[in-house]
Image (tube, grey):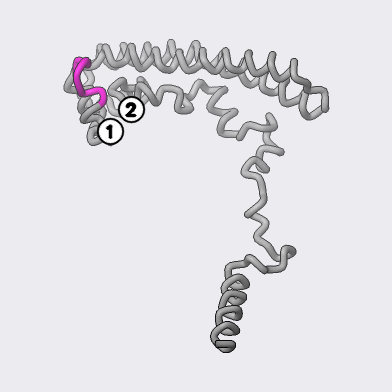
Amino acid sequence: MKALYRFLVLSLVATLLVSGCLADPEKADPQATTSPYVDQLSSSIRGLSEKEIADLSSGAGMGYARPAELNGYPGPLHVLELAEELGLSKQQRDEVQAIREAMLEAAVPLGKEYLEVYAAFEKRFREGSADAETVRVFSDRLGEIDGALRAVHLDAHLTTREVLSEHQRHEYDRLRGYSEGMEHGAHGEGHDH
């Protein structure tokens, strides 16, 4: 019985050593505790990635229109990218291009405003002058801009959908890989798909 007990204890200790539970903390994996935001310390606006900054500056979608995109409301950029496959007429291309340009005309200034407000907000924390009022005021303003950006992108999807035929919308969904998951979504009751 003693031999079995000793075997079990040694097995447990060996397992813990191999799994790192009893490993030397000095040799622990530094990635396990490093923040995923550490790269944003050197970003031009601390707290945002360079990609987020570029996307906001250029009017990129940033996932704002996912509810539309995933439910049968195509986005203008992707429709233009798939123009040949969708068989868009010249008039449709022109209309979708105009929708995209109008969207960018609204989204770019909003994105730049978001970046300005965010930078001022972050600066308050960096300088140590942030307080509850700062958090409330800046958070409210960033939320307003974020909502406006989302609406601009979703409106573009609504308008783009109206330009396409039912067949083109189905084809868009197929080409984008959405067909499988849309059986009970946008193609169901209550939609004109």
Label drawn at residue 178: 1
Residue 34 in the magenta stretch? The answer is no
At which x and y percent is residue 117?
A: 67, 18
Which three-letter amino acid code belongs to the residue tagged 1?
Tyr
Report the residue that reaches farthest toward the front. Answer: 1
At which x and y percent is residue 13?
A: 62, 75
Which three-letter amino acid code belongs to the residue tagged 2?
Leu
Residue at the (60%, 70%) spot, across then down: 16
The range drawn in magenta is 185-193
Q: Quadrant of the C terminus?
A: top left
Residue on which disc 2 sits: 70
- Give the quarter of the image for residue 81: top left
At which x and y percent is residue 68?
A: 35, 21
Report the residue that reaches farthest toward the left. Answer: 167
Helix, strand or loop: magenta stretch: loop
Query: 152 or 25: nearer the eye?
Result: 25
Badge 1: how crowded within 10 Å, few (<14), some, or many (20+)? some
Determine whether label 1 and label 2 are within 8 Å by CB: yes
Mark earlier in primary sequence (1, 2): 2
Badge 2: how crowded within 10 Å, few (<14), some, or many (20+)? some
Q: CA distance from mark 1 to mark 2?
A: 7 Å
Residue 188 in the magenta stretch? The answer is yes
At which x and y percent is residue 181?
A: 26, 34
Residue at the (19%, 19%) spot, across then down: 189
> Does the image show residue 1?
yes
> Does the image show residue 85?
no
- Give the quarter of the image for residue 118: top right
The kind of secondary structure element at disc 1 is loop
